[in-house]
Image (cartoon, rainbow, N blue to C red):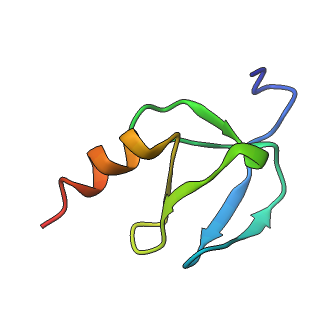
């Protein structure tokens, strides 16, 4: 994804939904640093306020929590 042409969004992650605070086309995965198009975003943590590229990344990150 060409990140220069598509600015990064800022989101507030809730339980089961997110709110766009600053419009953009993507967010960044907290584990891999990979750009995630908003239309593909399915995994995030409301408590940590971060997005994940997929279930493996979410499990990897959340499995590290106490």
41 over 36 or under it: above or below: below
Q: Residue at x 77, y 66 (%)?
A: 20
Q: Is residue 44 above or below residue 39?
A: below
Q: Is residue 34 left or right of residue 40?
A: left
| Residue at the farthest top position | 2
- Say if 2 sits above or below 51 in the image: above
* Residue 40 visible in this rendered orientation of the protein: yes
Residue 30 visible in this rendered orientation of the protein: no
**Which residue is outermost to the left?**
66
- Residue depicted at x 28% and y 44%: 60
Q: Residue at x 75, y 27 (%)?
A: 3
- In the rendering, at what x and y percent does residue 28 appear? 57, 41
Q: Residue furthest front?
A: 55
Left or right: 35 as drawn, with respect to 43: right
Q: Residue furthest bottom?
A: 15
Residue 24, position as x, y percentages in the image: 82, 48
In the rendered image, the vertical position of residue 16 relative to residue 7, given as above or below: below
Q: How many marks?
A: 0
Residue at horizontal 39 percent and vertical 41 percent from the top: 57
Residue 55: image location, x then y, percent: 43, 45
- Please state the horizontal and vertical placement of residue 6, each as a whole percent of the image: 84, 34
Horizontal relation, residue 6 to residue 61: left or right: right
Task: Give the position of the N terminus as an image quadrant.
Answer: top right
Question: Which of the 4 quarters of the picture holds residue 66?
Answer: bottom left
Q: Relative to 1, is 33 on the left or the right?
A: left
């Amino acid at each position: 994804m060409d990140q220069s042409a598509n600015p990064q969004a800022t989101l507030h992650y809730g339980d089961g939904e997110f709110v766009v605070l600053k419009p953009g086309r993507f967010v960044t995965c907290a584990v891999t640093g990979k750009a995630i198009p908003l239309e593909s975003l399915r995994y995030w943590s409301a408590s940590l306020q971060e997005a994940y590229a997929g279930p493996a990344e979410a499990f990897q990150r959340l499995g590290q929590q106490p």
